[in-house]
Amino acid sequence: MTFSDRKAFVVGGSRGIGASIVRHFTSAGATVIFTYAASVGAANQLAAATGAKAIQVDAGSRDDLIATIRNAGPIDIFVYNAGLLVVGDPLTLDADEIDRMFDVNVRGAYFGSIEAARLMPDGGRILVIGSDTADNMPFPGLAAYVLTKAALRGMVRGLSRDLGPRDITINVLQPGPTDTDMNPADGPRATGMLGQMAIQRYGTADEVASLALYLAGPMARGITGAAQTIDGGFAA
């Protein structure tokens, strides 16, 4: 697939899955803009290596995110990868931290997708990165996080109806255990997660990015309002 005539905008693109998505789309010829929150060094290195443009913005600030997307001009492909993970006993977790996670994981995904759709020509693509925990959560302490990821499933179903007349597709990718800074393959949770998987190995950011590339391409024009799980059978 070639994306030489496409502009992609990736929210949360400096590290992990987001960085791999930036690399895959630039390698396929797309013009890529990505945002980052705090990882200045990683963002600058990625921009230098790929030719993508890096913009610092808080994905949890609705007005700032909308303005950044609007200033980018027409967008063919929008990927929302920003996310926070707050773990712990729901009876003792700080309410402000939970609100912050909702702002980034849900509100940012919704308002970012809407603003991108305003700028998008017919036939555009919107992808949001969720989690297979929306379907299967065998561990305690993640109720609020799972709520945010399950919300994305409802969002893409609804927006698929709203945007379908313009031939714009919107889907959520649901990775399982993936070897990133947030959940490394040699981390403290790895053994327990591997025991839940049908294919007992962590996924890679490149595998998720390859799926994103396919869903943004012409062969996936009939896929919309769907959850595309890539988790080694964690939620099987």
Image: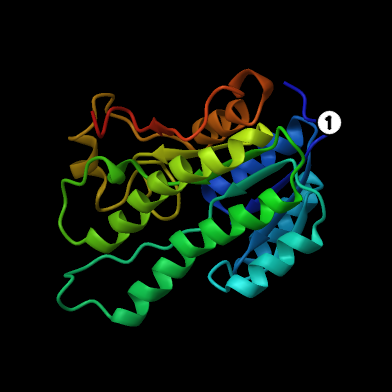
Q: Badge 1, how many Cα within 10 Å: few under 14, some, many 20+? A: few
Q: How is the image coloured?
A: rainbow
Residue 188 vs residue 84: left or right?
Answer: left
Instruction: Identify which residue is drawn at 66% across, 73% down.
Output: 64
Q: Which residue is mark 1?
A: 4
| Corner quadrant of residue 132 | top left
Q: Residue at x 53, y 49 (%)?
A: 16
Question: Is there any visible trace of residue 148 in the rendered image?
Answer: yes
Residue at the top extreme? 219
Residue 93 coordinates in the image, percent (x, y): 23, 76
Residue 104: x and y, percent? 48, 65
Is 55 located above or below residue 49 in the figure? below
In the displayed structure, 65 sits above or below 164; it is: below
Q: Quadrant of the N terminus?
A: top right
How many tags in the picture?
A: 1
Q: In the image shown, does 130 or 112 lie closer to the viewer?
A: 112
Task: Decide which of 13, 135 is in the foreground and name it.
Answer: 135
Q: Is residue 40 left or right of residue 190?
A: right
Instruction: Name the residue type under label 1.
Output: Ser
User: Residue at 76% of width from left, 47% of height from top?
Assistant: 75
Q: Which quadrant does the C terminus fall into?
A: top left
Q: Residue at x 41, y 55 (%)?
A: 182
**Residue 133, image x, y percentages:** 29, 45
Local secondary structure at mark 1: loop
Residue 14 in view of the camera: no
Q: What x and y, as percent, mark residue 166?
A: 68, 36
Left or right: residue 219 compared with residue 95: right
